[in-house]
Structures are given as structure tokens and as C-alpha cells.
Image (cartoon, helix red, strand yellow):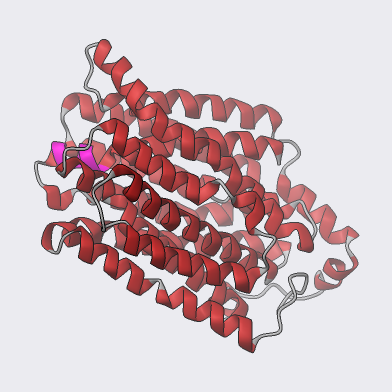
Amino acid sequence: IGALFVTQSLASAAIIANIAVNAIAGAQLSGNDALAGLPATLMLAGAALSAYPAGQAMQRFGRRPALLVGMVLGLMGMLIDGVAVLSHSFLLFLVGLFVVGMARGIIDQSRYAAADVVSPERRAGAISTVVFASTIGAVGGPLLVGPLGQVAAAGGLPELTGPMFGGVALFAIATLVMFVFLRPDPRTLALRLNVQTTTDAATTAVPVRSVGTILRLPLVRAGLVNMVLGQVVMVLVMSVTSLHMSHHAHGLDSISLVIGAHTFGMFGLSMFTGRLGRPLTMMFGALMLIVGALIAPVSLLTPWLALGLFLVGLGWNFCYIAGSALVADAIVPSERGAVQGASDLLVNLGSAFGSLSSGFILAGLGYLLLCLIGAALSLAPLSAALWWGHSVHYRPTSVER
């Protein structure tokens, strides 16, 4: 888990630094504010495209080779983005973001690799640990935007190339760390644990179920509602906040502070998230999404925006970790790669929809109505949490069939 923690931190810093400025870069390169959400959409589309094949590859070849491919793709995507900004090419910029998104779709499955190597009752805590690793990136990534931009400007390059080329270096380090220290493969450890645990050993005689059958389980559906809708709301609000601030004379320092608060909310308290129990975690997550989306548009002051975005990030964290744990609880090692890849595919498709629509909603309706739409969508995971908590007797160590 230590190697996963370090590599997730570095990759997260690179990706989040890119996210902090890609709406601004997209608007500048395209000359159309309505297309500000398109860069994030391409990133999420790349993540959606790679999620299921990555899960299949992890099931067949192991977690380590697939995660290494993700790191290399991240390095390549960041390099393409930097060149795109230098050459003022919006199309090339989108290509780079798509490649970065493919990397993210693979790397995000590190949380499942952590869940592979622990017993069921410790699963949410293991997932939380890897998600918590992104705290370093969540805080460091946005804070690097300003200094990296200044370094780029001092070297005669466009300011926005700083986060891109800085991301190349971060992904290079992460690739090296993973190659050297992620041994043995988490999938190998998972199979050993499966044999050694009495409960899991009994499940080895159970035929592998189809992905469709598993996704129809009530346990998995509740997890997916929280993961997908939590992601949609978070992306909808976050994707264009930097552009909203830029339109009201906020500089990169203020924007990076708000995005830093948001990403700290996403990852900073992850070590504690798994301790509340699945239903309560989901309920609190949905409530925080609602409150954060209602606070964000009230004022243009940086602290107020930071508070709203922090709560949106924290709400996402609760929904994402609880949902991931529910999905992991419902399956055995032989089913994990494909099912977890499919669930991440749905999450990233939802994200792509939220990101693509965000630019058009901002341009047509404004930031206030965009946030109100996000608050309304958050009622779905809240309803799922209330239903699950009241109608199902749930034990974290059980595996539903």
C-alpha cells in the first residue's frame, strides 16, 4: 500500500494541477467560453474509455502492469498538452487531455488494488488510505500552478505550460517508484488471501457471475448511485469554477486556492471516511454535496467560494469511498477486475456528461443555476442512502449473492 500511496500522490498532483487550469486554457485556445467544459470532458471521456479495458487487463495480467501503463500514458498526455499550449492548438490540447484521462481511468483503480490485499472488514480503510494519498496532490497540485507558471514565464514560455511540463516530471517519478516498489502484484496477494480466509475460500467454488448480473445487485446499485451521481455533481460544479472566477477578475493564485480547498475536501479526510459505516457515510456525503453547491454561488469572495468547493469535494469523498466499498464487498477476486472496471466506466461517463454540460450551463444560465442543478442532483444519492440504511440489514463483512 506504501507504493500505491506515493504514486497516487504524485499522479494526483500532476492531474489536479492540469485540471486547475484546463478550463482557462480551453477557453483561450478555442476563443469560446461555452467550450470551457470540453477539455475536462475529453479527460473524463478518456477515463471512461480506459476504465473497463484496464479492469479486464488487471484481472488477466495483474494490477502492476496495467497501473504502469497508466503512469506512462499520464506522462505522454502532459507532454502533449504542454506542446499544444505552445503551438496554440486547441485540437492537440484535447488530444493530450484525452490521453491524460486514459491514464486517470487506469490509475484511479489503485484503490481497488489496495482493497485486494486486506480482509473485508479493513477494505474501506484500505480504499480510504489510497484516496487519502491524493491529499498531497490535492493540496500540492493547485499550489504548484502559480510557481510553475512563473517558472515557465521566466523561461519565455506561456504561463499555462508550467503545470503541463511540471506534470511530465511528476509522472516520470511516479512511474519509477511504481516499477521499483510495487512488488508483489496486489492481485497475487489477493488470491493468497482468498485461499487463506475461510469465508473467501468457500466462495472459490461459486461460478463467476456476469458483470450484468452483479451490477443488478441492490448492494452494487446503491454503491453505483453514490459513485456516479456524486461524481457528476462534483464535476459539474468544479469544472467551470475556475472560469467563473476568472471572469470576475480572480488571478491564478486565488483560483488555485479555491481548487486546492476543493481537492483537499476530496481527499484530506479520507483516513476517517471508512469509520462511519456505509449508509451513514453515503447520507452525510449527499448532504454535504447539497450544502456546498448552495454555498458556492452566494459570494464572489475567495474564502466563500473555497468553503463551498471544499464541501462539494468532501461530499464527493464520502459518496465515492462508500460506493467503492459497497461494490468491492459484493464481489470475489475472480470478478473484481471486470466489475470494478465497469463501475468506473459508468462513473467516468457520468463525469463526462457533467463536464460537457457545465460549460453550456454556465454560458446559458449562469453559475447560480448551475450550482442549483448540482444540489438537485444530489438528492438521488441521499435517497439511495436513506433507502439502503432503512430497508437493508447490512454487514460490511458479508458478500451478497
Horizontally, residue 38 falls left or right of residue 380, namely: left
What is the x, y in percent for residue 192?
Answer: 84, 53
What secondary structure is the stretch in magenta mostly built from? Answer: helix
Percent position of residue 283, x then y? 54, 72
- Identify which residue is drawn at 72% across, 58% down: 123
Can see residue 95? yes
Could you say which quadrant of the image residue 196 lies in?
bottom right
Would you say 368 lies left or right of 237 here? left
- The quarter of the rendered structure image containing the N terminus is top right
Magenta residues, as a range? 23-29
- Residue drawn 47% across the image and 74% down it: 381
Describe residue 301's horizontal placement relative to residue 401 as left or right.
Answer: left
In magenta stretch: residue 116? no
* Residue 275 % position (x, y): 70, 60
What residue is at 43 percent from the left and 44 percent from the top? 261
Placement of 182 over or under 241, stated as above or below:
above
Q: Nearer the viewer, residue 70 or 230?
A: 230
Quick one: which residue is furthest to the top in this view? 155
Q: In terms of depth relative to the viewer, which is nearer, 264 or 216?
A: 264
Look at the picture and state if 116 lies above or below 17.
Answer: below
